[in-house]
Every structure is written in C-alpha cells, then in structure tokens.
Amino acid sequence: MTTQLLQKNTLLNIISHYIPDNPIIIEAGAFDGRDTRKLSRQWPCGTIHTFEPVPDIFALLKKNTTSLSHVHCYNIALSEKTGTTVFYISEKPNKPGQPFQAGSLHKPQKRLSFSDVQYKKTIHVQTITIDDWAKQYGVNHVDFLWLDMQGHELHVLKAAPHILKTIKVIYTEVNFGQAYENQYTYEQVKQWLEKRNFQEIGRDFIDQKQWFFGNVLFVKK
C-alpha cells in the first residue's frame, strides 16, 4: 500500500474507512478539545475517551466538550506506568503564564531551539497505562488511537500490550530528532509498529527536512 500525503480536511474521512461507525476512540494530549470536537462530529455514535493532564488546560477541555455526551474527559496522562511523574509546562513569550500545547512528560532538549516556546514550570501529574485504565473502566477494546504527546507516544504503546491487540488505527505525532530527552524517533516508532502488524498508509510531511515533527497514520494489516 502506497503512503499518501495527508491533508487535515480529509484525514478523518480516510480513517473512517478502517473503523466502525460507532468506534471507541482514545485521544491522548487533548489540550483544549479542538480535535476532540472534530472527532465527535465525525463519529457522533462513537465513544471518545480524551486525556489531558494539566489542570488549567483540562478545565478548558471540559468546558469545550460539556455538551458532548459521548466524550469522556480524564485529568490524567497516559504513560508507560501508573503513578505520578513530572510534566513540563510550555508557554509562549507573548503569553506568559498561559499553557501552550507543547507541554511534555519529557524534558525539552532540541525542542528549545526549534521555536520560541519556553518551559519555565513543572508540575506533578497522575499517570496511567492504557491497559490499567481499560481494566479500571471495563473497556475491552479500542478501535482508534489519536496520540499527540510530544515524544511520549511509543512509551504509551509499549505499555499497552493487551489493548494494542484490539486497535485498528493509530494516528500519532512523531519526531525526527531528539526534541525531548528519552523520546523515540519516527523511524523507531514505525519499526516497532510494523513488527506488530501495523502499516503506514499516510503522513503529513514529504520528508524529514521540512520541520522537526510530523504526524503519521498506521492501520492494522
């Protein structure tokens, strides 16, 4: 199957060919819910479980999805372990004190040289693995994963061997270099998923020289 160049206005329609009309969806790194709302409109009969660990941002997420009965919000971070850990809050210089959407469970490394985003504050957040969360909430399968976690995506996948077997589609952010400490690169993510019978069918970048990150669509063979 040839990898296609993904466009925002057709992405969800492409994904809809690979999952049921009433899918169970996990969105990790929801931020203020702008993508959550798009997912809810595309799959009004689905169930969306969305995760955002930063309290101030979570309040926005709840506010922006309060009318969506099929969206369930969790003020916790999906991770490779269940417990607590440090989260690095990001902000833009022109909006001091206002969290930006580049916060991460990983300490920024080259990320600091890619733009003017700053990391002046850390907080401790609750974490949970997908498998532990699924067991706790009685979820026995997930159709679609949407991961936007600033370098933490493969850590989450590696800690979800049970639910991973049920997943049909993964749309994930990937990095091309060490933007954050202890993160995996695009090639490492791709190789790991290919070994587990996932195939890349689309991405939103032509090559790795355009920018330091991109997004890739994988489907189960």
Image (cartoon, rainbow, N blue to C red):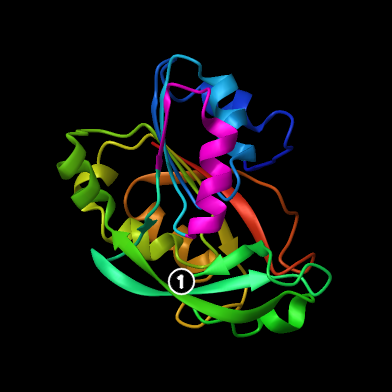
Q: Residue at x 52, y 82 (%)?
A: 107
Q: Is residue 220 left or right of residue 136?
A: right
Q: Which residue is drawn at 70% across and 40% down?
A: 6
Q: How crowded is mark 1: few (under 14 residues within 10 Å), some or many (20 or more)?
A: many
Q: Residue at x 24, y 43 (%)?
A: 163
- Where disc 1 sits, the SS reads loop
In what quadrant of the picture does the N terminus appear?
top right
Which of the 4 image quarters holds residue 214?
Answer: bottom right
Would you say residue 181 is visible in this rendering?
yes
Q: How many labels does the image show?
A: 1
Q: In this view, does 20 lie to the left or right of 120?
A: left
Task: Give how far across and how far down residue 210 sits, in percent.
Answer: 80, 64
Judge whether residue 201 is colored magenta. Answer: no
Q: Is residue 108 above or below residue 148?
A: below
Q: On the image, numbered disc 1 is attached to which residue?
A: 105
Q: In this view, does 46 lie above or below 92?
A: above
Frontmost residue, 80 versus 200? 80
Would you say residue 1 is visible in this rendering?
no
Q: In this view, does 209 lie above or below 11?
A: below
Question: What residue span does the magenta drawing correspond to?
Answer: 54-73
Specify the farthest residue to the right. Answer: 94
